[in-house]
Image (cartoon, rainbow, N blue to C red):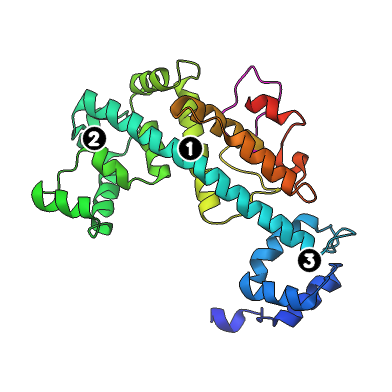
Amino acid sequence: MRAAQFAKEPATIDAQLAKLEFRGCIIEDKTYAKFILEKINYYRLANYFAVYQQNNKRYRGGTSFNKVLKLYEFDRKLRGHLLIFLEEIEISMRAAISNFHALKYGALGYLSDSAFNHHHNHHHFMSRIDRLKEKNTDINFVSHYNSKHMGAFPLWVIMELFSFGMLAHFFKSLHRQDKKEIAERHFSGLFPAGHIESWLESMAALRNHCAHYARLYSSRLEPVPKPLDDLSFKMGGDLFSFIYVIKLMNKHLSGSEKIEAHLAALLEEYAEVAELAVLGFPENWEEFLE
């Protein structure tokens, strides 16, 4: 029934190019454009053409296939850079949270709902733990703990299977005082636990956004990280707000202060297509990151 009612038909690459031209796209080299559309799905690339689309569905003057492809390449490289710094946050926070929790509640303390706040759904949490064990039986340390320790995984071991999102949820489920102590210990008491909780959720969402190759340029990101009060720019759902949080967290967690150098080089290379305002970057963005 659904197949019978579905009206869209697949289009040839020639038809795809014709559609782009009809909407005002300049195609400098059709042979090259065909080659690209054989490597990159039209629907994926159309998401970048949408940046230049007007209300009448036609593209702004000067929109060319090569320009859009360059924007696509910029976005791809930007995701790659961000994933490196997000990985540092994720790994550092795994260590910070597991070390604190295991020392306070014991290696298997996470198995008890008393180690979490009253919002925590322990039954659901344990079901997720069980699924992680079942899904990853082919990993050496999982088979080791299943066979040698009767499936009893210390927190610092099982947390190696957590996604970034599950790690953020684990922190959110901790007792208020525990979150406060972790925040004070690893962020020099500069940021309240509520900010760290919010930032972890935002970073987990950004990591998934990047890992699934979703467009960053001209996109509103969610959930918006909780803003700081003493900033001269407004934090929101723009990419720069997320990058600012990456910088703050990595500076305290790993001592990493390299992100602005990567960004500056990338923005210079793609200055033709990457507009700072679209990314939410203030003109003096490097000063904020310093």
Q: Nearer the viewer, mark 3 or mark 1?
A: 3
Quadrant in the rendering for residue 156: top left
Question: Range of the magenta residues?
Answer: 225-239
85 part of magenta stretch: no
Mark 1 and mark 2 residues within 8 Å of each other at the beta carbon: no
SS of the residue under disc 2: helix
Q: Is residue 214 left or right of residue 48?
A: left
Find disc 3 in the rendering and name its residue: 65
Which kind of residue does numbered mark 3 sit on? Phe
> Image quadrant for the C terminus?
top right
Crowd around label 1: few <14 · some 14–19 · many ≥20 (10 Å): many
Instruction: Tell me the residue at 90%/59% (across/down).
Output: 61
Find disc 1 in the rendering and name its residue: 201
Quadrant in the rendering for residue 279: top right
Whole-number angstrom distance, CA of label 3 to CA of label 2: 53 Å
Percent of width and height locating residue 169 = 39, 38
Would residue 24 be seen by someone viewing this image from the given angle? yes
